[in-house]
Amino acid sequence: MYAYTDHSHVSCITPYRYKRVSCTWYSPVPPWGQAGKLGRGGGGEGRHEALEAIAVTKLWSVARSAASCSSTSTASRALATTAHQPFDSVDAALRCAAAAMGLLTWLGFRRRNQFESLTLLDHMLSSPLTYLVDRFYHLVLVLRGSPFYPPRGKAAIRVVCIADTHDQLVSVPVGDVLIHAGDLTTDGSAADVQRQLDWLKSLPHPVKIVVAGNHDSYFDARSRSADDVRTAAKLDLDGLLYLEGELTVQEVKGRQLAIFGAPDIPECGPENFAFQYTPAKQPWLSKVPPRTDILVTHGPPKHHRDLGIGCPHLLREVWRVKPRLHVFGHTHWAYGKESVYFDGMQVAYERLLSRPRRGLLWDLVPNESWLDMAQVLLHGVHSVLWKWLMGGPGSNQGSLMVNAAQMHKNSGTVRSRAVVVDM
Ligand SMILES: [Zn+2]
Ligand SMILES: [Zn+2]
């Protein structure tokens, strides 16, 4: 456990100083995820980065052995012993590498923390082949076209998706269903939440769905502020459908639409964050009803518009239910849409992303990741040929995942547009 401070104003995850909890269980496990333990006691990022640099110079196994050390000198000693090199030279190299990595981060060539997108250099140091396959995977998704279309002969239902407005108002297009996937506020007081709710109520959409985010502390009795408890503050939710692990079936344009919403999110911050769960108590097992058309959660599933911090248990549940539309937010930097087809290509892609990254050079040595990559390539080419050349069933059999975070990265301003889906 180590203190983590992020002064960004509206980070979904880190607006306060807090003790970092065991979040790595749902993160991909890069080889240097373990090396990060070196960071305890301050200045850790530099040593962590130094170990990454060492990976590039083929000292992966050596660095791994040093990963459990608690200081630079201990790490240097372990490295020196394993590599049969003088302590001073290893220690100096480690510090130089740390300084170089720090400089690259300062210059913007590397991301500052795990809540930002990976830079090109990050990808190259982590696993360039995985990066290329990831680009290929998303190209195939584009070539496969829209994952679904509104049913023929029936009026399309327009679903407007937003999330992470963090006390701000955004321009919302007209539609039949409006979904807010959480983080209405930043501080989560009843007064702040009510202001956002009143704004949502004023919008013309016939059906309005609201799910709480980790910042909306009022909704979770465990995270509610002392002031709100003392004053017994209440919310007026009239005209909105607030979902907390519930299913609602709405009739829209003569069609039934089953919408399930749940705010639960993997542990990611202080105690005044709402609806956090630990791996042991993750709530997703068989939680989502099988007939769900639209799933609304605050957090993303693993591997899809999640910056690597999505929940694997939620992903498993999504695989089981296969909702046509999954709306979420939370990872501001991962805003956007992504088709999913629950097929062999997606299986291989998710398995590839869940493997440890091997680093720039070791990536080129044959390993099990290559099999996943080959499967992604084969399934990808096959799916595109099937759609465009062989007149196959096309792309009307997929689902759509939407990260609707309105907050632009951690800029403090809402610049992303509402995501509109016709179904
Ligand atoms: Zn947020
Ligand atoms: Zn959030």
Image (cartoon, grey):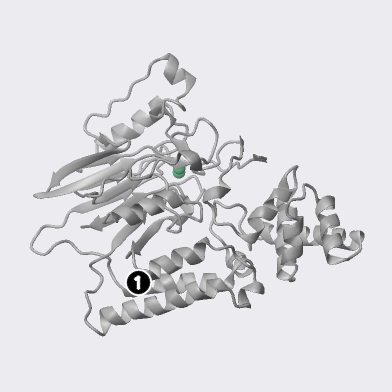
Q: Quadrant of ligand 1?
A: top left
Q: Quadrant of the C terminus?
A: bottom left
Farthest-out residue, bottom: 389
Q: Nearer the viewer, residue 116 or 383?
A: 383
Kindly give the residue lying farthest to the top in the view shown.
230
| Residue 127: image location, x then y, percent | 59, 69
Q: Secondary structure at mark 1?
A: helix
Residue at 51% from the left image edge and 48% from the top image edge? 411
x and y percent of residue 45 in the render? 70, 51
Q: How many marks?
A: 1
Residue 120 percent location from the top left of the image = 58, 68
Taking the spot 11% from the left edge, 64% from the top edge, the residue there is 152
> Amino acid under label 1?
Val
In the picture, measured across the screen, residue 105 lies left or right of residue 336, that is right
User: Between 69 and 231, which is closer to the camera in this rendering?
Assistant: 69
Mark 1, residues whose alpha carbon is within 10 Å: few (<14), some, or many (≥20)?
Answer: some
For label 1, the residue is 142
Q: Residue at x 54, y 51 (%)?
A: 115
